[in-house]
Amino acid sequence: MATKIVKLATLGLKAFINLNQSMIFTKATYIISNPDHTACPKPDRPEYAFIGRSNVGKSSLINMITGIKNLAKTSGTPGKTQLINHFFIESKAKELAPLQQWYLVDLPGYGFAKVSASKRKSWEKMIGEYVRSRENLINLFVLVDSRHTPQQLDLDFVNKMGEWKVPFAIVFTKSDKETQKVVSAHVRQFAEAMKKTWVELPPIFVTSAEKKTGKADLVTLIEEMNKEAFEKFKNKDA
Ligand SMILES: Nc1nc2c(ncn2[C@@H]2O[C@H](COP(=O)(O)OP(=O)(O)OP(=O)(O)O)[C@@H](O)[C@H]2O)c(=O)[nH]1
Ligand SMILES: [Mg+2]
């Protein structure tokens, strides 16, 4: 099925410049896990969620970003994360910068073959409802395994986000498991596949939670989007 050409309406991304800032995390704590979006914390802070196939490395990436090894639970067995998990984060861009308080969200993976069809369906429903109705969701990070050529499931997912107008960035994971040449080829192929239906590509990152690479660019993007989001929150309250 042909996908509608969609233009990214991504908050803050145009303003994104890598200033080589490195975010200082002053607090990162687990708050709550929920089976559906209605029970999530009050949407009064910017929120960033991590999604992707089961086992792609979502929970590991959250731990890498915050620098806390076991903040989000990881596992070698796919299907570990089964609920919407909220983490409260307090950070600043540099020593004297103002504190920013925001949420990180670890989501279950999509497309996991080894759970029952009904469970898979209910996860997909939970994810779909969460990304479409969570009003403080500033950006979704869609994780893609850098060891593979473009997978239809991932392309279908990003196209769905386009249809739903959910702002997202793509994060290639596990880049330590392949040579840089292979990883670059897979990233290029994914971008080419997206260009068939997209007029503008989202931001793309290459990471390894194992080697702790790619963190600075990700946190810089969050920092920039936070600034813009806080302005919006302020205007809403005024
Ligand atoms: N080599 C390597 N292994 C990784 C990396 N990121 C994650 N892993 C491993 O991949 C497995 C899955 O990682 P998780 O972070 O639990 O993946 P997930 O996407 O949260 O998985 P689910 O919650 O089950 O959907 C674990 O064994 C991790 O140690 C990486 O960058 N490099
Ligand atoms: Mg997980």
Image (cartoon, rainbow, N blue to C red):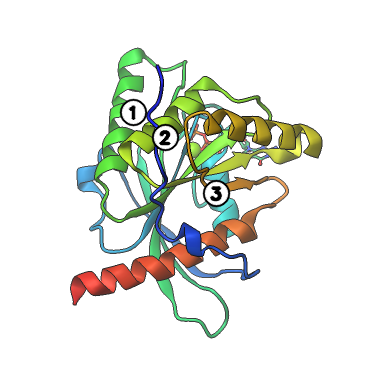
Disc number lying in front (1 or 3): 3
Q: Residue 108: which disc?
A: 2
- For numbered disc 3, what is the local secondary structure? loop
Whether residue 150 is situated above or below residue 32 in the rendered picture: above
Q: Amino acid at mark 1?
A: Trp
Q: Nearer the viewer, residue 210 or 222?
A: 222
From this viewpoint, is residue 91 visible? yes
The residue located at (40%, 16%) in the rendering is 1
Q: Amino acid at mark 3?
A: Pro
- Assess whether mark 1 and mark 2 are in contact (beta carbons under 8 angstroms): yes
Disc 1: residue Cβ within 8 A of ligand 1's nearest atom: no
Q: Residue 202: which disc?
A: none
- Asked whether, in this view, residue 87 is left or right of residue 232, the answer is right
- Asked whether, in this view, residue 60 is left or right of residue 27, the answer is right
Residue position for label 1 = 123
Point out the tag, 2 or 1, that comes first from the N-terminus.
2
Whether residue 186 is situated above or below residue 137 in the rendered picture: above
Disc 2: residue Cβ within 8 A of ligand 1's nearest atom: yes
The residue located at (38%, 31%) in the rendering is 160
Point out the tag, 1 or 3, that comes first from the N-terminus.
1
Task: Calculate the distance from the C-alpha at mark 2 to the C-alpha at mark 3.
Answer: 22 Å
- Asked whether, in this view, residue 35 is left or right of residue 205, the answer is left
Task: Calculate the distance from the C-alpha at mark 2 to the C-alpha at mark 1.
Answer: 7 Å
Relative image position of residue 151 (x, y in whole percent): 56, 23
- For numbered disc 2, what is the local secondary structure? loop
Q: Amino acid at mark 2?
A: Pro
Residue position for label 3 = 203
Q: Residues within 10 Å of mark 2 (few under 14, many from 20)?
A: many
